[in-house]
Image (cartoon, helix red, strand yellow):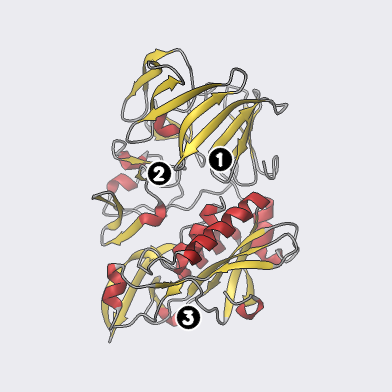
Amino acid sequence: MSNLETSRVANEVGRGVNYTYDGDGRRAKKSSGKLYWYGIGAEPLAESDLSGNVSEEYIFFGWKRIARRVVSTSTVFYYFADHLGTSRVMVQATQTTACYEADYTPYGKERVIINTCPQNYKFTGKERDSESSLDYFGARFYSWTLGRFHSPDLPFIDQKPWNPQSWNLYAYVQNNPLKFVDPSGNYLQPYGASPNDMLPNVNGWSFIGGNQMWTIAMSTVPQAVGGESSETTTTSADVQQATGTQNQQTGPKLGIGIEVPAQAAVENNVLDVSVDSGHTFAYVRNASGEVVSILSFGPGEPIGTSNKGEFQAGNLSGNAHWPLQGNATTWEFSITATQMTAALRAMDAVRENVPNYTPTRQCTSAALSIATAAGVNLPRGIGPVRATALGVTVWSGRAANPYHLNQQMHARYGPPRVVNTSIFPTP
């Protein structure tokens, strides 16, 4: 558990249980007697007592919890979830009948049918705290009795005038819990989808999964930060790195670099990518401060009138070695050796199997996918974008882009460190 005790402690009112969070904002400890042990993801792989004696181990496949092992008896239980990831049935290994079965109301009230193997991971797979009966979603706590979060979302992020369901900052998945889930307390999506699967839509966003498309009038919400009333915070290490003092190397770091578009490309907060698209890249420093890998993703050829159709259709080839140029704003984040390995593997995977360059899979979303692979939760960089030709708008929508990511990173982490990209090795 990284940076334990460096972030915050939250006290559940009237219950006397303190929750301690690590530097990545993940719950690390319950004062009532539980420690959480993580891999590179946001879900715990094991739980132990306060002395570190492991009591439960969890197995995941495709980022979904599929089994639990009780260490004291070596007993294995298998989870069977519904279309929202809610644990509906559990079966003990070697048995053929369920030891746990329950139905759930749309907003998460449990109706137990049988329960001879109690477990805490319930509605959409989130832990239900016995001391408060609240579901822990990461950024916020959720009350299934109210069908609402216990703290508000960030204001003015994804509230849309044309979608009244988005106006309530406490609402759960815009009051559509049969179709959508909220993986972290920050944004809604169809279960099993990824924020990087989003496509721009004139009314907001569309997700594509299987043979279906869902339209959502919203943008992805960055992870909430703030004071004690917020469910997540920025660590002191993040603040130091964001103010430009990250040159003091104290371990591996993940970096985000942004070649900010010229101001002439921005009008009324809309980025015209045909004037200057800017560029976003990700890089990794080892414990010695050496940049050991860069992912700089771009199009296989410059986008113009002759190939814009290929780009919009998702058929334009990509380039995992897009050259850097000029100055870049940079932010760096301390990561563990395990997280560094995950980031390096994610970069290698892109270089070995270069995807097409599309409106939703471009430089910014590619760089942020490396941060996600490393378990670093960053703003999504989503904002209004357009492309023009001879003064006529040929495409407009909302997409992750360098200009809006630079704004959001500055707002969350403070001033960046500005460097000339010549200091980096060739991507």
Which kind of residue does numbered mark 2 sit on?
A: Leu
Task: Locate the C terminus and report the quarter of the image it occupies.
Answer: bottom right
The residue mark sitting in front, 3 or 1, is 3
| Separation of marks 3 and 2 at Cα, in angstroms | 34 Å
Q: Position of residue 129 (x, y in %)?
A: 52, 25
**Which image quadrant is residue 388 in?**
bottom left
Marks 3 and 2, the one that precedes in the sequence: 2
Residue sitting at x 67%, y 41%: 1
Which residue is labeled 3 in the image? 262
Q: Looking at numbered disc 3 in the image, what kind of residue is underneath it?
A: Ala
* Comes first in the chain, label 1 or label 2: 2
Q: Residue at x 67, y 25 (%)?
A: 49
Rendering quarter of residue 102: top left
Q: Is residue 76 above or below residue 156?
A: above
- Mark number displayed over residue 169: 2
Up/down of 394 relative to 345, above or below: below
Find disc 1 in the rendering and name its residue.
229
